[in-house]
Image: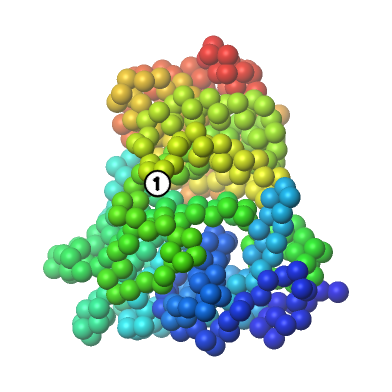
Amino acid sequence: MTVKLSKAALQNLPKNVGVPGYSQSDLKAGIIHFGIGNFHRAHQAVYLDALFNAGTDHEWGLVGAGVLASDEVMRQKLQAQDWLTTVVEQDSGHRVAHVTSSMIDYLQPGDSANTIARLADPEIRIVSMTITEGGYFIDPASGVFNPQHPAIVADAADMKDPKTVFGLILAGLIRRRNEGTAPFTVMSCDNIPGNGHVTSDAVSGLAALIDANLAEWIKQNVAFPNSMVDRITPATTDRERNLLATDFGIEDNWPVFCEPFKQWVLEDHFPTGRPALEKVGVTFVKDVAPYELMKIRILNGGHAAIAYPASLMDIHFVHEAMEEPLIRDFLTKLEREEIIPVLPPVPDMPFDDYFDLIVRRFSNPKIGDTIQRLCQDGSNRQPKFILPTTADRLKAGRSITGLSLVSALWCRFCAGTTDSGKPTNYLDASAERLKVEALKAKDDPKAFLAMTDIFGEVGTSPIFVESFSRILRALWDKGARETLKLYLDDKL
């Protein structure tokens, strides 16, 4: 017997399921969040749920928002269960489920007028977002906002009906300025170095297309705190829905399964106020950059490193990749010899201890995180998680063999087949172009590096070109398994 999740059913849920100690009716909207995906519901929404359960800060309820077709699908799924989400935390000896109720509404995607009106509401003091690394209109080669992107140009031409997150945010800020309402704080929760600065560049960059004075007002009056967020949260499939029904007796349209670990480091810059998240484990600091760089380079870079050899070796789950000695040892050698040595120190966080924690998290057999998830969106992730480390080592005159191997593995993966001949199905906005150039690179490795919007100056470095070319040939000639062996034996 299972119970379909809803507010009315909360009292009938099994005793081993945690339920909110507060009522949705007790909450008032204080935050609008763009991008109600799994990560947000396992992270920011969970922290707020814990705070509300402590009986405080009920004026900071979440309102969902989005601009994509997938956002409307999520909205309908969550609306059918009164905006509730079941979050299941699990590792090898631990599995607990609790229902969060921190979201109280979800704006209709595509209804610009209503979304702008809610953004202009003085009760909304924070607008946050998890829109993925690829959602910021960044030129991968230069690393800065691209004001010539067609979607941005279109919003600048019609601010009454903007279609992007930044267009909607700017429209809301314009109305607040016109009405004499203090601007809300804009808080990015995405894995991008300097995510607050990047978001500021996007909003003010769009504003500059409309009015230089408006752009200057944004820079002078709107807060964009930087943050570092962390929690491994796989995609939801029928596997997770069935596990929830079998183990906890709950029917949830879109549950979230995640690891027990979570972390949030945030700059304390909220002029119109913020929830007291320090009470539930959020770390507030003056400068988040060292924490953020550590996480992006070690964890996200580590994910990018193991994704492609695992895929080429037909490995399905992340924990299975970590059970393969070649991949685990490759990750360890790469991190300890090339990634960690070029990182600035982080207060009270020894890198060796942090990396050991990452290995344990990647090895968690209960998460069900897939290699396919890690492989997607490489054209946005490589320039953010791998190539900056490569650039740092090139500038310092240090070895880049392992990092070149990561990029070559990605190229080999993009060619479309694993070493056994199975298709490498993946999601990437540049998927077709990547495959074309990767196949060219089999005979001419420079073809792949010629994508300057991805590789930038790294792709023109003679040292990197030679290393990448040599390793890519080894991957085609010998396969991923034998090439990893050569790397581990210092013979690559």
Disc 1: which residue:
291
Q: Residue at x 27, y 57 (%)?
A: 201
Residue 243 relative to residue 291: left or right: right
As drawn, the residue found furthest toward the top would be 491
Q: Position of residue 361 (x, y in %)?
A: 61, 44
Q: Residue at x 27, y 65 (%)?
A: 223
Query: Does residue 441 appear anywhere in the picture?
Result: no
Looking at the image, residue 397 lies above or below residue 426: above
As helix, strand or loop, the secondary structure at mark 1 comes to helix
Q: Position of residue 181 (x, y in %)?
A: 25, 82
Q: Residue at x 67, y 61 (%)?
A: 88
Residue type, label 1: Tyr
As drawn, the residue found furthest toward the left would be 213
Residue 462 or 329: which is nearer the viewer?
A: 329
Q: Position of residue 8 (x, y in %)?
A: 69, 86
Identify the image quadrant of residue 397: top left
Query: Does residue 230 appear anywhere in the picture?
Result: yes
Q: Quadrant of the N terminus?
A: bottom right
Q: Position of residue 207 (x, y in %)?
A: 23, 66
Residue 164 or 249: which is nearer the viewer?
A: 249
Looking at the image, residue 427 lies above or below residue 27: above
